[in-house]
Amino acid sequence: MKTKNVVQPVAVDPRTAVYHLKVHILNISPMIYRRFIIDGNTHIAELHHLIQMMLGWENQHLHVFHIWGVDYGIAYEGGTYYRDDPSEILIGDLGLRAGDKFSYVYDFGDYWKHEIRIEKVENARPGYHHPICTAGRRACPPEDVGGPYAYQDALIGQFSWIQETLSNVFESIENREVPDLDLDSAPWWYLKHRSEVFDKKKMNQALAKLYQKKGDGKFWRTLGGYDAYFDV
């Protein structure tokens, strides 16, 4: 009897492997999420900024990752202290496999808790140069809106305000009057926030710009906002 040749799976090197991740904000429906790809040499400080950029946060508040019972993050003066240098903790050294999950909390006041799931781990693919966003849904909530439950109430308030404002405009036009718009009394984000919109192409263009400037650990530990990377 002939024996069949069994093809053995190729072992994945966690340092050079490509990780497919999905991050979403808990307690919001419909879900706000991003799917993205990183490699095992991505460190915790880098991952923090990737999540901030891809979701649409502005890096204005403290944060923490909770992985295998340990807290990680970038320590800021007057904020939380972390034992480990986040630019030296690599994703490939954390023993993460497909199906594993860990959490990321941003803004301890509003308390935006995110779940990050490892969807797939595979050997390095040809042509991989830097992290990319592969999918996403819905816009990020505005900063300081109050947290997940307050945000959903705020969206109702935004919709009602827009409807009332448009009604006043149309009524003024019918009466051949100049609309009396009280825009100063509305929250700053009412006029520009589009809750159902996510532009993957624009996001990946911003990531490409970021990785043209990518530096050492200090670059990631001191990186501030992200507006410059989204400028056309």
Image (spheres, rainbow, N blue to C red):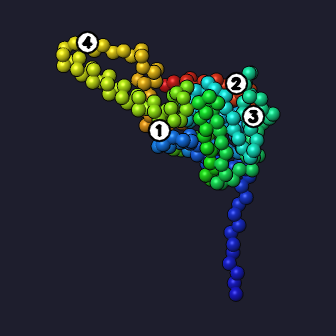
Q: Is residue 152 visible?
A: yes
Mark 4 vs mark 3: which is more N-terminal?
3
Q: CA distance from mark 3 to mark 2?
A: 12 Å
Q: Residue at x 40, y 28 (%)?
A: 158
Q: Is residue 212 visible?
A: no
Identify the residue under disc 2: 222
Mark 3 vs mark 1: which is more N-terminal?
3
Q: Position of residue 138 (x, y in %)?
A: 47, 38
Q: Is residue 31 above or below residue 207?
A: below
Which residue reaches farthest right? 83
Q: Residue at x 69, y 63 (%)?
A: 9
Helix, strand or loop at mark 2 = helix
Q: Residues within 10 Å of mark 3 (few under 14, many from 20)?
A: many
Identify the residue under disc 1: 138
Which residue reaches farthest left? 175
Residue nearer the viewer, 188 or 2: 188
Identify the residue under disc 3: 86
Say how many tags the image has. 4
The picture quadrant where one finds residue 129 is top right
Q: Residue at x 21, y 18 (%)?
A: 173
Residue type at tag 4: Val
Q: Position of residue 204 (x, y in %)?
A: 54, 36
Residue nearer the viewer, 11 or 63: 63
